[in-house]
Amino acid sequence: MTIPSIIGGGLIVIGAGLGIGKIGGSAMDAIARQPEASGKIQTAMLIAAALIEGIGFAALFAS
Amino acid sequence: MLKRALHILTIITLFSISNLVAQEHHEEAKHETTSHQTENHSSEHNQHGEENLSLKDKIKKDIKHHLQDTHGFHITKGIEFPLPVILWDEGLHIFSSSKFHEGNGVVESNGKYYAISHGNGHIYRTDASGKIEHNEKGFETNKKPIDFSITKNVFMIMITGLLMFLLFSGLAKSYSKNGGIAKGPGRFLEPIILYIRDDIAIPNIGEKHYKKYMPYLLTIFFFIWFLNLFGLTPLGVNVTGNIAITVALALLTYLITTFTAKKDYWKHIFWMPGVPVLLRPFLALIELLGTIIKPFALTIRLYANMFAGHVVLMSIIGLIFLYKNLVGGGLSFLLAFALSLLELLVAALQAYIFTMLSALYFGAAVEEHEHEEAH
């Protein structure tokens, strides 16, 4: 663990957090507008969040 | 309704508390055994100075030990289940893992000596004194036999396989017996199976092809889910948090995608219709890379989630031993309790995501495009 890798890991977590937060927020908006489509929105939200999370973890392990 | 909710809450609470208590015991037991082994090996392991470890380092070591795949279960102090060790080293060697805890930790089998390295938990061939050599980078230089042992992870996979076989064959039997109505544990499983079929398989793969993939999707969902839940029990197993297991699972998805893919799938990889011809070779390169990145992401996602979950949970339990007062300990306990509940959710969520993404990849493999040039 060197200092650059720690900083890099922190930046990755910030980026992934922002991304997943944006997805979650947009999904909330979408569900509020169209509650009957909440099932489909949730699925799409989880997939998108999982993809970001995967990249985040991959980068975190590389750092 | 309220009564049932209270029931479930009580069960979850008991479950989480037993989990915490057992892990605390587990850690204590580990201190005992490490110090015990240190005495025996003190002549060889002076350079490590294991006896002078601070509490923080001991907790770190215990977490590392928990995440490793070991030979035999250590539930608490005095309760241990040995598992068979099967080695191939110019001949077959079979003995019980409890032999590693007798005497100085060296096992003699058919004229050869074996010892477990403290660093990575693997078995190495040694001389009669059990000395394991390290090179300057800290890697073991002893000869390593080919290890087919029934380790903790292998054992839990077998148990899960058996459990799944019993549960689902029971469900199948109850259908034929009761005229199409599930009974017993099948009542709980049936909605989950229907959910995977109606909300994962059919929307992603399509009505036409989904039946072919249902056995795999159901197997992988329940396999990952059950193993994730076993990871939360006091047995101290960490199967889905082991990268070898997740690589194998993702490889299965990759192989099934590759070998069941239709003509259109390959056409869209190597010669994408609807884009300028000059761009197509570059797109082929990117698409080809994408087919490898997909299973890689599946591997890392499941592994890292379970691994990180175990590390965080055990670190917070470790804080109780560091603070050693009511406020710090109580807060750590509450935090660990909340995290255990979160891990219950993550256990199901990760199984769902793995199944979902597998279904998505299968869907892309069998997709048929009617109007080719419309892209």
Image (cartoon, helix red, strand yellow):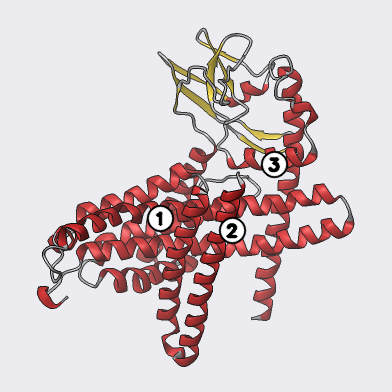
Task: Pick the residue in front: A63 or A21.
Answer: A63
Of pointers 1 and 3, the one earlier in the residue sequence: 3
How many residues crowd mark 2 within 10 Å: few (<14), some (14–19), many (20+)?
some
Labels 1 and 3 positioned on one and the same chain: yes
- Secondary structure state at the residue bearing disc 3: helix
Foreground disc of the pair 2, 3: 2
Callout 3 amino acid: Lys
Contact, mark 1 vs mark 3 (Cβ under 8 Å)? no
Residue at (87, 60) in percent of width and height: B327
Nearer the viewer's eye, disc 2 or disc 1? 2
Callout 3: few (<14), some (14-19), or many (20+) C-alpha neighbours within 10 Å?
some
Asked whether the beta carbons under mark 2 and mark 1 sit within 8 Å of each other, the answer is no
Q: Is residue B371 visible?
A: no
Amino acid tagged 2: Gly
Query: How far apart in space, not on screen, are marks 2 and 1 (Cα)?
Result: 20 Å
- Determine crowd level at label 1: few under 14, some 14-19, many 20+ residues with C-alpha closer than 10 A: many
Q: How many marks?
A: 3
Q: Of the numbered discs in the image, which one, if any, rests on residue B60? A: 3
Where is mark 1, residue-wise?
B297
Asked which secondary structure carries label 2, the reply is: helix
Three-letter residue code for mark 1: Ala
Callout 1: helix, strand or loop?
Answer: helix
Please check whether the numbered discs 2 and 3 fall on a single chain: no
In three-dimensional space, the C-alpha distance between marks 1 and 3, rounded to whole angstroms, equals: 28 Å
| Mark 1 belongs to chain | B
The answer to whether residue B19 shows anywhere in this view is yes
Q: Which residue, as the protein is rendered here, is positioned at the far bottom? A: A33
Residue B210 in percent (x, y) is at: 26, 66
B365 left or right, relative to B110: left
Q: Quadrant of residue B267?
A: bottom left
